[in-house]
Amino acid sequence: MAILTLEVENKKMKFIKDLLQHFSFVRVREESTDEDSDEQVVSNILKGIREMRQIEQGKKKARPARDFLAEL
């Protein structure tokens, strides 16, 4: 069996699910897109490391932690 991953707009999701239910050879397994994939997590960590190195080298300006937390 093969796995095919689709990205569908939220407003079209019901249509796609209804369509796929008409095929007996298709099984639908929903996955949440709220969580980052492993690749995205690694990419975000590497980006943070690059930014940290730029700050250490003086190429980029750091901001106070209070400002960062205030944005959250």
Image (cartoon, rainbow, N blue to C red):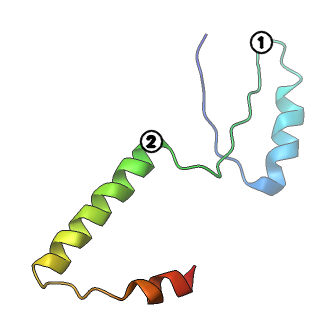
In the rendered image, which quarter contains the C terminus? bottom right
Q: Residue at x 64, y 48 (%)?
A: 33
Quarter of the figure with residue 49:
bottom left
Q: Nearer the viewer, residue 68 or 9?
A: 68
Q: Given this view, does label 1 or label 2 mark the residue nearer the observer?
A: 2
Q: Which residue is mark 1?
A: 25
Residue 24 horizontal/vertical position (percent): 84, 13
Q: Quadrant of the N terminus?
A: top right
Amino acid under disc 1: Phe
Task: Determine the residue located farthest toward the front in the rendered image.
Answer: 66
Residue 38 disc label:
2
Is 55 drawn above or below residue 37 in the view shown?
below
- Crowd rating for badge 1 (residues with CA inside 10 Å; few <14, some 14–19, many 20+): few
* Residue 31, image quadrant: top right
52 relative to 32 in the view: left or right: left
Where does residue 67 sit, x and y in percent of width and height? 46, 89
The kind of secondary structure element at disc 2 is helix
Give residue 35's mark.
none
Q: Residue at x 35, y 53 (%)?
A: 43
Q: Which one is in front, 60 or 13? A: 60
Q: Secondary structure at mark 1?
A: loop
Mark 1 or 2, nearer chain start? 1
At a point 60% along the width and 49% down the height, the residue shown is 35
CA separation in Å, label 1 and label 2: 29 Å
Q: Nearer the viewer, residue 34 or 70?
A: 70
Rendering coords of residue 20 (x, y %): 82, 28
**Residue in the picture at 12% in, 85% down:** 58
For residue 71, which quarter of the picture? Answer: bottom right
Q: Is residue 47 above or below residue 56?
A: above
